[in-house]
Image (tube, helix red, strand yellow):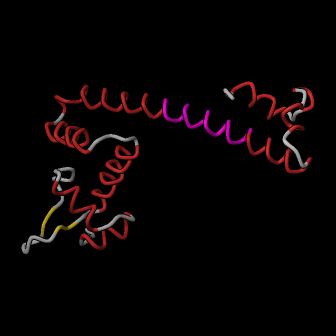
């Protein structure tokens, strides 16, 4: 079985050693073994767990809630429903974030077209006064989806 020091694990996970130490101090990786000298030793299976922590953080989940998940995990099957519910809640939040970002992207795409058209014409009056039927299909659809 391959073991990794914290610096090797950090490189492998594209994190800093500080981040891994922080996760350990916060109780997010309680199963990481230590050598006789107290050095943290990571196994391949630990990396999946660390990726899961990164995923939860990417959703905006606070460390306190991630720790709650870890605690529930360590408690075992009696907490399955709690853990499941936590992920459904995260799923809903991420879907809302994606929807919000899609609206933002639609606005940016429209504005790129608007300014490309204005620069080519030398004036903003061309895209401002353009009839919807003269716009490219994608832009006409975007314009209907944004609130400008």
Q: Is residue 88 left or right of residue 127?
A: left
Look at the image and say whether residue 25 sits in the magenta stretch. no
- The secondary structure that dominates the magenta segment is helix
Image quadrant of residue 78? top left
Q: Position of residue 11 (x, y in %)?
A: 36, 70
Q: Which residues are magenta?
A: 96-110
Location of the C terminus by quadrant is: top right
Give the residue displayed 24% in from the left and 29% down from the top: 80
Q: Is residue 50 left or right of residue 129?
A: left
- Residue 132, above or below 73: above
The residue lying toward the viewer, choosing from 1 and 121, is: 121
Location of the N terminus by quadrant is: bottom left
Give the residue displayed 35% in from the left and 46% down from the top: 57
Image quadrant of residue 91? top left
Q: Position of residue 43 (x, y in %)?
A: 26, 63
Q: Position of residue 59 (x, y in %)?
A: 40, 41
């Amino acid at each position: 079985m391959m073991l990794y020091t914290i610096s090797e694990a950090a490189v492998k996970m594209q994190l800093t050693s500080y981040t891994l130490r922080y996760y350990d101090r916060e109780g997010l990786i309680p199963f990481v073994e230590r050598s006789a000298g107290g050095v943290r030793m990571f196994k391949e299976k630990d990396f999946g767990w660390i990726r899961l922590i990164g995923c939860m953080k990417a959703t905006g989940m606070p460390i306190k809630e991630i720790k709650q998940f870890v605690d529930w995990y360590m408690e075992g099957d009696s907490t399955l429903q709690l853990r499941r519910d936590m992920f459904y809640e995260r799923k809903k939040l991420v879907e809302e974030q994606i929807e919000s970002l899609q609206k933002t992207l639609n606005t940016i795409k429209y504005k790129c077209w608007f300014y490309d058209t204005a620069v080519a014409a030398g004036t903003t009056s061309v895209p401002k006064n353009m009839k919807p039927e003269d716009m490219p299909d994608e832009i006409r659809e975007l314009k209907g989806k944004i609130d400008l």
